[in-house]
Image: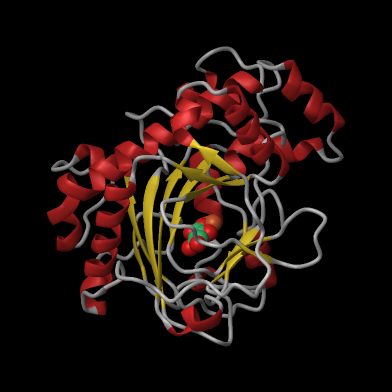
């Protein structure tokens, strides 16, 4: 069982203490808490979230991940996300490159589109394994709903702090339009010879991540080494992705992170994790919102490479490019790897 007690995260290795944001206090409009959130989002782009109220939904999603990953590989491959850049469905271990030399990954993904969870029993994008269908109403939809609520609360705060007209960021993340918003359940076996997920920035706006075993590491600006983020029970980990970094002219930070084998005695166990990726609607053109906020205009004006904030693509195109070029079937050499990269390399 994924959900039973785990060996402890070792107490003798360095970890990076993310700021802890109390979601209940954020909802009450607590000024100190909002200030802490702003500091975390602009300095590192990663923070813990406590009192998010999603524990039960998260627990059930871990069960769903476990049930689905236990299906025979043949069955899971019927729902493969394919190589054209689509990012919903199943991805087998060994389908993606994890470095410029084309080393294969060892992690399985199950991505369930927000649009499919909300449309169920109708289909918005694609079909899923029977284990997912059986829990679409009881498990997936409630997790999606909770995740949207938490992420949108953060977006509203960023909207105000960025000096954007009320509702600007929420309008770019409409619940009922097609988007790349998705749940992701991961599973990786213990490994010694490679990273589980190599250094990357997330593609969308906000990631709401739930970890039980260690292995996640962040590259803190100015630091010389990767640092572990210790999982804390009841604490989610939230981070900014490329889309929000671009929209905010770099004021909100999309930070590099990666996943390695869990440290210490945790390292002999399979590692499961769960994320909800909050992303702009497919047709949103990614560009810094300079016309809507003097703060953002000023940040872009001072940026060493302002072109970075006008990639000239939609959120869907950005997501598809990055997904497509990770896929080993599209690997032609180091240049394919570079084509899969985001705002920070
Ligand atoms: O599994 C984790 O801890 C992080 C996963 C991650 O970074 C991702 O899926 O983008
Ligand atoms: Fe990530």
Q: Quadrant of ligand 2?
A: bottom right
Quadrant where the image shows the N terminus: bottom left
Which residue: 56% across, 31% down?
A: 285
Vertical arrangement, residue 33 with respect to residue 160, above or below? below
Query: Coloring scheme of the render?
Result: secondary structure
Near-viewer residue (189 or 280): 189
- Residue 137: where, in percent of width, then height? 16, 45
Side of 44 where 129 appears, left or right = left
- The image shows residue 238, relative to residue 299, as above or below, that is below
What count of labels does the image hold? 0
Judge left or right: residue 107 versus residue 204: left
Q: Is residue 71 above or below residue 177?
A: below
| Whole-percent x, y for residue 304 in the image | 87, 40
Which quadrant of the structure image shows residue 40?
top right
- Please say whether residue 312 is visible from this viewpoint: no
**Residue 70 at least partly seen:** yes
Residue 3 x/y as whole percent: 30, 66
323 vs 16, left or right, is left
Please tell me whether residue 21 is drawn above or below residue 231 in the rendered image: above
Horizontal and vertical percent position of residue 179: 40, 38
- Tell me which residue sits at (50%, 37%) in the image: 22
Q: Is residue 157 left or right of residue 170?
A: right
């Amino acid at each position: 069982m994924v959900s039973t007690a785990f060996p402890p995260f070792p107490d003798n290795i360095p970890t990076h203490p993310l700021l802890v944001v109390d979601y209940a206090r954020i909802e009450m409009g607590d000024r100190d808490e909002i200030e802490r959130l702003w500091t975390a989002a602009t300095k590192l782009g990663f923070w813990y979230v406590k009192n998010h109220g999603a524990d039960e939904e998260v627990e059930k999603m871990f069960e769903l991940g476990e049930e689905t990953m236990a299906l025979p590989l043949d069955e899971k491959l019927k729902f493969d996300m394919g190589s054209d850049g689509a990012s919903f469905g199943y991805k087998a271990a060994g389908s993606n490159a994890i470095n410029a030399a084309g080393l294969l990954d060892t992690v399985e993904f199950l991505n369930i589109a927000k649009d499919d969870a909300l449309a169920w029993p109708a289909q918005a994008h694609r079909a899923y394994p029977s284990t997912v269908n059986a829990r679409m109403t009881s498990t997936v939809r409630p997790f999606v709903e909770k995740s949207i609520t938490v992420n949108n609360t953060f977006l509203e705060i960023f909207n105000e702090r960025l000096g954007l007209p009320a509702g600007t960021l929420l309008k770019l993340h409409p619940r009922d339009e097609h988007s790349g918003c998705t749940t992701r359940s991961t599973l990786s076996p213990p490994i010694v010879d490679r990273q589980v997920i190599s250094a990357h920035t997330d593609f969308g706006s906000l990631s709401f991540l739930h970890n039980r075993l260690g292995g996640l590491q962040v590259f803190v600006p100015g630091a010389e080494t990767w640092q572990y983020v210790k999982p804390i029970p009841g604490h989610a980990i939230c981070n900014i992705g490329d889309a929000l970094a671009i929209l905010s002219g770099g004021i909100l930070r999309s930070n590099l992170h990666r996943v390695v084998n869990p440290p210490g005695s945790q390292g002999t166990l399979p590692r499961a994790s769960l994320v909800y990726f909050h992303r702009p609607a497919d047709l949103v053109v990614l560009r810094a919102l300079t016309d809507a906020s003097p703060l953002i205009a000023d940040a872009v004006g001072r940026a060493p490479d302002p072109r970075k904030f006008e990639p000239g693509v939609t959120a869907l195109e950005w997501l598809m490019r990055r997904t497509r070029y990770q896929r080993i079937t599209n690997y032609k050499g180091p240049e394919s790897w570079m084509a899969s990269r985001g705002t920070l390399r």
